[in-house]
Image (cartoon, rainbow, N blue to C red):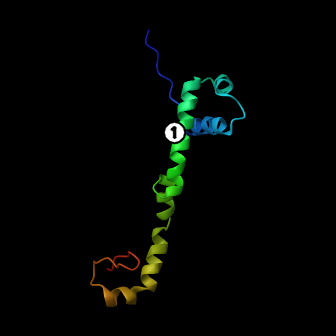
C-alpha cells in the first residue's frame, strides 16, 4: 500500500520554525505538539535563520516587493509632472538615467 507524503504549507513551516527559534519548547516537544518529526523542525529552523539575512540584505523577495511597490498611477503622475524634464533631455522611447522613467 502506497502512502502519500504529507506536505506542509509555508505558513505552517514558518510558524513552527519561529517557535523553534524562540526556544520556549524543545524540538521534541514541538514535534509532539505539531505532529511533525523533530528533524523536519530543525531543518525549517535552519532554513528560516539562513533566509533571514537575505531579508535585510536587499536581495530577498520582501526587499524586491518593497522596491516595486510604487503603483503605475504614481509612476504615471511622476511622469506627467516631470514631462518637460524628460522631453528636453531624452528622445522619445529612451530611458532617463536620473529616475528610470521611459519618455514617450
Query: Mark 1 packing: few (<14 Cα in 10 Å), some, or many (20+)?
Result: some
Instruction: Answer yes or no: is residue 49 visible.
Output: yes
Q: Residue at x 28, y 82 (%)?
A: 92
User: Quick check: can you spot residue 9?
Assistant: no
- Residue 57 position, x and y percent, is 50, 57
Q: Secondary structure at mark 1?
A: helix
Percent position of residue 27, x then y = 64, 27
Q: Position of residue 103 (x, y in %)?
A: 33, 80
Left or right: residue 31 compared with residue 88: right
Residue at position x 28%, y 78% from top? 94
Identify the image quadrant of the N terminus: top left
Q: Residue 102, position in %: x, y?
A: 34, 76
Q: Residue at x 63, y 24 (%)?
A: 31
Q: Which residue is mark 1?
A: 47
User: 92 and 30: which one is in front?
Assistant: 30
- 23 up-or-down from 57: above or below: above
85 vs 48, left or right, is left
Q: Does 85 appear above or below 73?
A: below
Amino acid at each position: 500500500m502506497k502512502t502519500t507524503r504529507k506536505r506542509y504549507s509555508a505558513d505552517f513551516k514558518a510558524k513552527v520554525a519561529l517557535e523553534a527559534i524562540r526556544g520556549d519548547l524543545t524540538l521534541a516537544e514541538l514535534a509532539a505538539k505539531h505532529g511533525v518529526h523533530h528533524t523536519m523542525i530543525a531543518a525549517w529552523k535552519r532554513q528560516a535563520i539562513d533566509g533571514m539575512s537575505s531579508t535585510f540584505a536587499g536581495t530577498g523577495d520582501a526587499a524586491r516587493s518593497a522596491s516595486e511597490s510604487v503603483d503605475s498611477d504614481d509612476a504615471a503622475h511622476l511622469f506627467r509632472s516631470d514631462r518637460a524634464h524628460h522631453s528636453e533631455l531624452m528622445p522619445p522611447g529612451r530611458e532617463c538615467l536620473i529616475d528610470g522613467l521611459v519618455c514617450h
